[in-house]
Image (cartoon, helix red, strand yellow):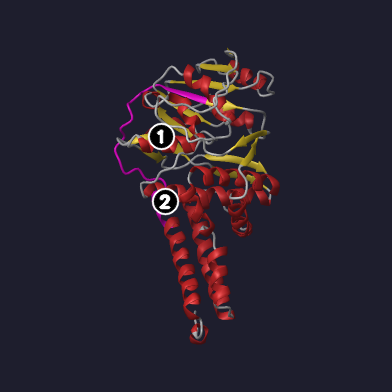
Amino acid sequence: MWDAPMWDGIGTGGSVALGLCAALTLLNLVGIAVTACRLGRRNHRPVFPANAPVSLVRPVCGIEAFSEELLTRGFRLAHERYELILCVADGADPIVPLLRRLMAAHPGVPARLIVGDERISDNPKLNNCVRGWEAARHDWVVLADSNVAMPPDYLQRLQAAWRPDTGLVCSTPIGARPLGLFAEVECAFLNTLQARWQYTGEALGLGFAQGKSMLWHKPFLEARGGIRALAAEIAEDAAATKLVRAAGARVHLVAMPFDQPLGRRTLAEIWSRQLRWARLRRVTFPLFFAPEIACGPLLPFGLALAAAPSLTLAAGLLGLLGLWYGAEIALAARAGWYRRPRLLLAFLIRDALIPLVWTSAWMRGAILWRGNAMDIRTRGADLDASAGPRRTWRRPRPSAA
């Protein structure tokens, strides 16, 4: 693939650039291979207590494209002993009538609707979970977003990932059912990029919490400040990661992650969401965020071409790009994730956005989430049970139904 004249006169800088290109390509291919091997495998005996009852807490806000379908799934889980706690911050939220209708349609499922949040942080989702957590009757509690597509064995799959050293079990979201090109770009971000690095990190003993689905042993978290301790960071999953590690435990992932149906997305929505997540990662885990600039091929391939421009090298890099994206498609096929021919275009758009998102993440400190302005500067709060967030808001005790 390489011709001898191409190497003539490259110099030390060019050799370093080409070596970096090869190393980063290999690193990404190894990450894809590790994830492909990790998905679907359970290399431990189940240690979760048999028949243990579970409290499923779901914060809900507003009506989305798949709200009725996804919320209904929470009432149809194949688990004999679970309660469902639905949390809504505002009683005037248009989702409330749907929740009451679903509760009436499934009288066999112990379910409660808690209206009213508690302002313990700038994180609206965490505020919406506090009352539900405190109302949970069981020692095992799952905090799950309203847009998680729960299969019938949802709780069992979370429980199966529990190990003797576990402090928390999570699932990264997998983009599914996209409508339009930019929804496919979100699939490209969520699935073969972000999920890949989540599973690779876990395989290396660096599991990171993901707020979409979180299985907690309630006494474990209560001994360390309870759910209010998660207000130590603007992102509750970042606080959860640090809390679990400080306790000498680990974050583990389910054998196969759960879908998040996307529907239609716009470029502005993709940009806003990815920038928000990037800024949160930059503030909470800056040393891990800094190398993210190299997780796509644009940087290493661009450096190589700049160092040794030639048609032969360009052809070689196109071959490597085909290998890179072919491996991602193979991972999606292995996992049963979304894959269509246009996903290749989505990969290209994603990888063009990565350096822009990464650069923008270092420039500003504020984000907007569901219309809420959030200051993402770390508060430096102690995760010890005796410490809490620096600012605390209170509202009157909410109603429950």
- Name the disc covering residue 200, or none: 2
Up-down relation of residue 20 to residue 172 (above or below): below
Task: Please indicate, yes or no, whether residue 212 appears anywhere in the rendered image.
Answer: no
Identify the residue position indicated by label 1 in the image: 243
Q: Can you give x and y, in whole percent of width and height, for residue 84 in the image?
A: 51, 21
Magenta stretch prevailing secondary structure: loop
Range drawn in magenta: 33-57
* Mark 2 crowd level (few <14, some 14–19, many ≥20, 10 Å Cα): many
| Magenta residue check for 285 | no
Up-down relation of residue 295 to residue 318 (above or below): above
Look at label 2 and name its amino acid.
Thr
User: Residue sitting at 39 percent across and 32 percent down?
Assistant: 159
Q: CA distance from mark 1 to mark 2?
A: 21 Å
Instruction: Residue 346 in the image: state x and y as whole percent.
Output: 62, 56
Give above or below for 185 relative to 235.
Answer: below
Residue at position x 47%, y 76% in the image: 15
Residue 164: % across, % down: 29, 35
